[in-house]
Image (spheres, helix red, strand yellow):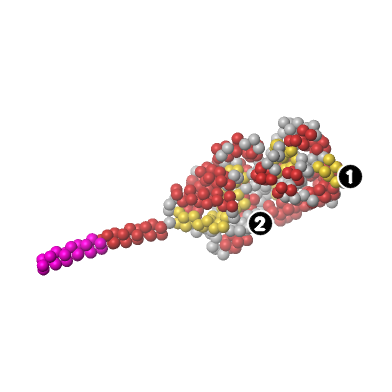
Amino acid sequence: MKQNNKRIGLLAFVFVLTLSMFLTGCSSKSSTSEKANGDQTTVTFWHPMTDVTGEAVDAVVKAFEKKNPDIKIKAVYTANQGEGKNEKLLTAVSGGNPPDVAYFDRFEIGSWAAQGSLEDLTDLAEGSGVKKETYYPFAWDEASYEGKLYGMPTTTDSRLVYFNIDQFKEAGLDPENPPKTIAELEAASKKLTIKDGKKFKRIGFIPWFGQGWFYGWGWAFGGDFYNPETKTATANDPKNIEALQWMTDFAKKYNVEDIAGFTDSQGEGAMDPFLTGQLSMKVSGPWEVSAIKKFKPDLKYGVFPMPTPTGENHTTWSGGWSTVMPKGAKNKEAAWKFMEFFSGAEGQKIFSGIARDFSVIDSVNEELGYKNDPILKEFVNILPVSHHRPVMTQGSLYWNELASAVENATRGNGTPKELLDKVTDKVNKELK
């Protein structure tokens, strides 16, 4: 009996010892796992994306983390991030506690780089083999300031003229041969316009309506807006003056007050005048395709490049987003890896495939099938010759002053030359 008790005691000891070793092993593994998690670098990423674009951001983050298990992306939604709405980010930079990466409007990179609020990415890009040639020229240039790279481009767009095919046919115009020259655009507009007294039942075209910003028409006429060598605004370039004179003459021809009465009464969405048939041609971007599918799916329409005086050298202008590294970012190496992935072909394909924004890489747009769509392909095909707004410290001021010049010129409050001289002087004083 005593011998059996000894045996039982021995077995119990062995069991306890084994259990102890097992638990110690588990504890050791648990400690290793916690340590591994502790070794992860957390990159904080601020972005303003919601809905579909928010889903696209999440997909990029998941794909990146799968390839880089040692890096955790803490994506933080930040409302009102974008052009002229970056107070929270600026406060974070000033306070020395910025995110590692921020989603940023490329239009503002120049002014932020000039004030020292962004990290210079030039050496990081060169060290990783990231090259300008991978991207559309305008996108890379807009993300750079004084020869240095400050942002990694992600998305873009372009602008063309939409036109109503049925109304073209009704007016005796050939929808297979839309206007190429300014003169042809004027002639088409005249044929398409139906006016009863001072009231437009239908207007063929309004140059400044929608996305008909002055930058687009200035470049269409062969003008330029900025001299990077002298770092001066050139709003009063002779070709820009010519473009504004054309817009002014157009306003006089159709009576600008009557046009204003027409545009002031128009709505958005389903009530957009192009969708209701009250406007036959309109400058807009690729997002218009989605609006038409949603509100007017049976509309027969096409697109063509903004006409030029000669009918040649058609161009457009593009905006878009980028990722930037705010000054004082704590985890630069890991942050750069994420930025490089997001703007690389793999990240671009994921993001653009979900968000349906154009990529800044031509091969990605082709792979996603944009070039197979009869409308979207026209927006993509013109991207290689697109312009970007001037990279300068007073970009927002310049934009607003040009818009005011168009408003004043078309309403007869000063000649195009006088107004554009004033814009040039004002912006250049601020630049100095």
Q: Which residues are magenta?
A: 1-20
* Residue shown at the point (46%, 51%) measured from the top left: 65
111 is within the stretch colored magenta: no
The amino acid marked with disc number 2 is: Gly
189 vs 416: above or below: above
- On the image, the x and y values in percent for residue 362 come to 58, 39
Q: Main secondary structure of the magenta part?
A: helix
- What amino acid is labelled 1 in the image? Gly
Say whether residue 258 is left or right of residue 272. Answer: right
Observer-nearest residue: 119 or 338? 338
Q: Which mark sits nearer the N-terminus, 2 or 1?
A: 2
Q: Residues within 10 Å of mark 2 (few under 14, many from 20)?
A: few
Q: Secondary structure at mark 2?
A: loop
| Residue at position x 27%, y 60% in the image | 22
Label 1 neighbour load within 10 Å: few <14, some 14-19, many 20+? few
Q: Of the numbered discs in the image, which one, if any, rests on residue 60?
A: none
Query: Which dot marks residue 84?
Result: 2
Q: What residue sits 22% from the left and 62% below the top?
A: 15
Q: Which residue is mark 1?
A: 197
Choose top left, top right, bottom left or bottom right for residue 137. Answer: top right
Name the secondary structure under disc 1. loop
Gap between marks 2 and 1 measured at Cα: 42 Å
x, y percent for residue 394: 68, 54
Q: Nearer the viewer, residue 259 or 15?
A: 15
Residue 27 visible from this viewpoint = yes
Give the image location of residue 409, x and y in percent: 82, 48
